[in-house]
Image (spheres, grey):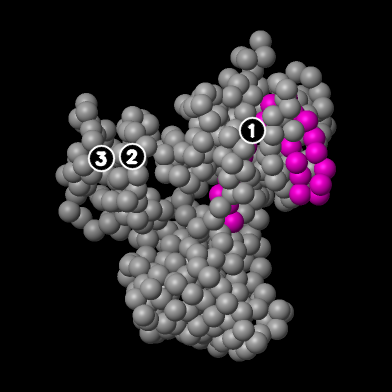
Amino acid sequence: MRNSNEICIVGDGFSAAIMVIHLLRKGVPPSSITLIGPGVIGQGNAYSCSSQSYRLNVREDLLITFSENPLHFASWAQNHIHDPKAKTAAGYFYRRHDFGRYISELVSNELGSGQLIHIPAKVTQIVRRGDDWSLSLENNNDLIAKQIIIATGNAPPIWPCNVIKKLASPTWINSHLVENPWTGDYLQEIRAHENIILLGAGLTALDTINALVEQGHCGMIYVISPRKIFPPAQASWQRLHEPNWPKKLSPRHLIRFIRDYLPSADTTSSEWQCAWEELRVNLNTIWQQFSSSQRLILLKRVGWIWSLYRFRAPPQTIASYEQLREKNQIHIILGRAKQIICAEDHIRVLLDNGCEAVGERIINCTGVGADPLLSNLISDRLAIPDGLQQAIAVDTNLRVLDSNQQAWENLWMIGPATMGSLGDVVAASAITKQAEQLAEQMIKKEH
């Protein structure tokens, strides 16, 4: 392969790092790889967090970075992580930043004495230049690439509604309106008796709850959510059986089959979670057989249920929630935020059902974000929206589809943004498989 921007990887988190690792393992010279992202390679939004209270929501044996050695992280953790709180009855659930440290070490080990080019900036636009690509960076620089892999991961969350700022100083607003809580930096600024408003009741909210409990928070915590339920705690599950799937499935038949397959046990039990995980094995293949309209039907009918039970929580965070609940220190307010009003010394949230919540700090735990780069690719007709209208479409070889639904031969995407096209691509093991697949394809293409 030729040097100097032969392969550009857009992103700096887990998806980008695992792509670098598997390209290097296939013999691609480090000098052929240019990585573009503002952060530390391998940490990104998910694993760059400073909080010791943010934990992985899966046990250590499920964080697979090498298919041929699935317990690599589990073995590394035993020798490199001191975390007495990691062990639970359901397995070891380590801190997020420790997994980020592991990924950064893997990149360093694979590089050895070699170096790749790391440009600490964000890519704002990608355009076609003959047979190559031109990437525009936020620092107003441009560069040319022969091949591009988009690996930007999950977009940082943005406010889900309008925010009105009244009579408050910019400093107060910036510290009390926490739009992106994933790093955890804001936690050290919270006073013990503040009343906190959390938007959303998913894993990010539970991370925040766990951190607040561990730092001895005494104030009330108000959780705004359309449903009065948190993700269940992970149980000690194993896949024991393989479902006997029907040959032809519509969205309605798929939902019915899943309901019939799941036992009547509690969702926190090993029995129920074993069955749920057995169903997940073949869901991506089934998903890819559905049309875009069928996928939207599924998302509308059971999308929230899927998120609830797919993204189960580490037991430590559920224990913190239960601790607050016993003290009557947490209250769930049903509804969706319609407007956030930031006044001189308080924040008021108006809900779509007429209710409201008042507190001294608000933390956006919705996880709802948008990637401007992907939107620009669609606007420039270099890509099309995926079936869920949430990212851009790719084929099964991870190639981005253009406005004519033709696959580019030198533009790929891996990671969570491929979910609308390919199905359940969120876990480290799923992204690892994509990186291994793409590295193999690229090597074969060169030869």
Q: Where residue 237 sits: x, y (%)?
A: 34, 47
Residue type indicated by callout 2: Ser
- In depth, the one of 355 and 235 nearer the eye is 355
Q: Is residue 396 left or right of residue 284?
A: right
Q: Residue at x 32, y 54 (%)?
A: 305
Quarter containing the C terminus? top right
Instruction: Point out residue 265 in the picture as x, y percentages from the top left corner.
Output: 20, 55
Callout 1 secondary element:
strand
Residue 179 vs 360, above or below: the answer is above
Where, quadrant-wise, is the N terminus in this rendering? top right
- What is the spatial separation of the Cα atoms under label 2 and label 1, in whole angstroms? 28 Å
In magenta segment, residue 143:
yes
Label 1: few (<14), some (14–19) or many (≥20) C-alpha neighbours in 10 Å = many
Q: Which residue is mark 3?
A: 251
Q: Which residue is mark 1?
A: 149
Residue 41 location (% of width, % of height): 71, 45
Residue under pointer 2: 293
User: The magenta stretch spans which residues?
Assistant: 135-156
Cα separation between marks 1 and 3: 32 Å
Q: Report x, y in % for residue 108.
A: 74, 39
In this view of the protein, which residue sits in the foreground, 67 or 433?
433
> N-terminal of the two: label 1 or label 3?
1
